Amino acid sequence: MAKIALITGASAGIGEACAHTFAREGYNLILTGRRMKRLEDLAQHLNNKYNIEVAVSSFDIRSREQVINNLEGLPAEWKKVDVLINNAGLSQGLDPIDKGSYDDWDTMIDTNIKGLLYTSKVVSNWMIANGSGHIINLGSIAGKEVYPNGNVYCATKHAVDALNKGMRADLLQYGIKVTAIHPGAVETEFSEVRFKGDKERAKKIYEGFDPLVAQDIADTIWFVASRPAHVNINDLIIMPTAQAAATNIFRK
């Protein structure tokens, strides 16, 4: 029987790359996100290419009711999730604390922390009932250090780091693995979302060096997920060669 991976934020970037990678490895997939058409197109492509089964569910991860209703509404056979990839997350704005937007703060906190919690609670209970599972949380180098104007985004990713450690401890008795992946600069939609569609400003973030790409992170996640049953990778930081720290990038 094929294993099942549930990937949040699967319509683009790291989530989409994970979908391709786990499909290639024979996993059936539950893909969630807000852009239903993109999820449906991705599901059709993966089904045609890899002959796997794909369930899609479109909802806003910030809404507790939407998360619970959509996930619990899945058929029983889809609740035998082996791997949960908590990928959905974002940054909004790059302002000092005194000039920050309340709306941006709410969006980051509701998505990066509360959305991850809502999803993890539902799926961890499935894993406990199933007797196994692996939760992989997407953190950030921003969860390991703080940089100017990163304030609330960094705080949300520090929270992911802490929650990852808490989940590891709480779920230990059930044999459920828990891992955090903390990337540095990855060229995806991330900066475009941060700058609210300003593509020119977003592009400048990645000028003068070779950033990571989504597939680099998907490959890392697959490595972590494919370790033997007795091996758990608790925490992993992955950076571009040109980046030593959040704000220390060597540009040519």
Image (tube, rainbow, N blue to C red):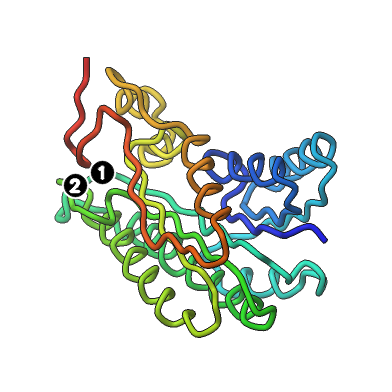
- Check the image and report above or below for 37 versus 146: above
Q: Which structural element holds mark 1?
A: loop
Q: Residue at x 38, y 55 (%)?
A: 139
**Three-letter amino acid code of the residue under disc 1:** Leu
Query: In the picture, which quadrant includes the N terminus?
Result: bottom right
Q: Residue at x 82, y 51 (%)?
A: 53
Q: Which structural element holds mark 2?
A: loop
Is residue 84 or residue 233 the one in the foreground? 233
Near mark 1 (Cα within 10 A), the count class, few <14, some 14-19 or many ≥20, is some
Labels 2 and 1: the sequence-earlier one: 1
Image position, residue 160 (x, y; %): 37, 64
- Check the image and report above or below for 241 versus 119: above
How far separated are the C-alphas under marks 2 and 1?
A: 5 Å
Is residue 122 or residue 105 the one in the foreground? 122
Is residue 252 or residue 150 the one in the foreground? 252
Image position, residue 59 (x, y; %): 64, 60
